[in-house]
Image (tube, rainbow, N blue to C red):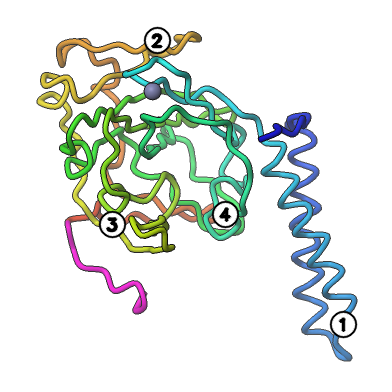
Amino acid sequence: MEQRVVKPLTKDERDALLEEFNAIQDAIQEGVKKKPRMSDDERDALRDKRDKLRQEYFDRLPRILVSRCPVCKTELMRAFDPWGLDGLWWQEEEFTEFEEPPACEHFAVLTGALNLNGLPPLGGRSQANPGPEVPYVIPAVLDLPTMTAVIAQIPMENGYTAFPIAYFCERQPPPEALTQPWRETSYNYTDVEGNPAWTVKTDPWEFELGPWIQKGKVKWIAPNDDQFQIRSGAPNDYPYADVEGLREQLQITDEEMITIPPPAGEDVDPFNE
Ligand SMILES: [Zn+2]
């Protein structure tokens, strides 16, 4: 497939784009409340403009190094908004399709955590689900044959710290054995018969990583390692053991944050949310 060449957004361009995006959202909302109401053509033109901005945002987000495969050592590059949770990348409702750099065959799923480092919560208009503040693993996924988790750290421009937690394996499990990716509250996947499927995974989280590190199931990228080299060792060598923060699921909208307990294997009826 031909890679489109796009110029990544600068912070100023990204901020201006989001401002225009929000202004159009306001104009649509006001327009449909107005009497007489905005014409359908006018509304559709605004929606079209908004959708184009959203697409441009995702197409031009920086693609950065977030992990490395422990099997074949290929870099994992992903789109990422390093500037703040006001960016649509963090807001599940604003997701749209976009092209990610290709990943190696061993990549399974990217989850993550986000530490606010004691700073006030600051999101955008739609809810962000950045995970807990402390890096964690999901034993139900990590226990799958040949599965390894790699934990990395990315300092964000707004003072927060992101922790990408990527799972890799030599043998891919059936897709339904994996979990919803970072920032998503439900899991959309293609089942073994090739049909689209979705569910809400509630497998418990584990923050005590010592036993997993001991078993070689958790590896890491050292802080500030530009080369993103895979490291492993004894639990004492793990560099993120002292990360403090909430071990709950954060939900951030504008300046509001609520926390909900980590999943505990509960049944979720997705149609009754
Ligand atoms: Zn690989």
Q: Are marks 2 and 3 in contact (CB under 8 Å)?
A: no
Q: Position of residue 214 (x, y in %)?
A: 11, 19
Residue underneath mark 3: 201
Q: Secondary structure at mark 3?
A: loop
Classify mark 4 as within 8 Å of ligand 1 or not, answering yes or no.
no
Q: Quadrant of the C terminus?
A: bottom left
Q: Select label 4 or label 1 by which is in front.
A: 1
**How far apart in space, not on screen, are marks 4 and 3 (Cα)?**
26 Å
Q: CA distance from mark 4 to mark 2?
A: 36 Å
The answer to which of marks 4 and 1 sits earlier in the sequence is: 1
Q: Is residue 268 left or right of residue 273?
A: left
Query: Ligand 1 lies in which image quarter?
Result: top left
Instruction: Tell me if label 4 and label 3 are in contact, CB under 8 Å.
Output: no
Q: Nearer the viewer, mark 2 or mark 1?
A: 2
Q: Amino acid at mark 3?
A: Lys
Residue 154 drawn in magenta:
no
**In contact (CB < 8 Å): disc 4 and disc 2:** no
What residue is shown with label 1? Answer: 38
Question: Which residue lies at the image location 37% right of the left edge and 39% below the top edge?
Answer: 109
Q: Which residue is mark 4?
A: 254
Name the residue nearer the viewer: 68 or 209: 68
Answer above or below: position of 256 versus 144.
below
Q: Secondary structure at mark 2?
A: loop
- SS assignment at label 1: loop
What residue type is disc 4 on?
A: Asp
Residue 260 horizontal/vertical position (percent): 30, 57
Give the answer, above or below, for where 35 lies relative to 261: below
The residue type indicated by label 1 comes to Met
Side of 262 relative to 273 (left or right): left
| Location of residue 26 by image quarter | bottom right
How many angstroms separate mark 4 from mark 1 (CA)? 28 Å
Q: Which structural element holds mark 4?
A: loop
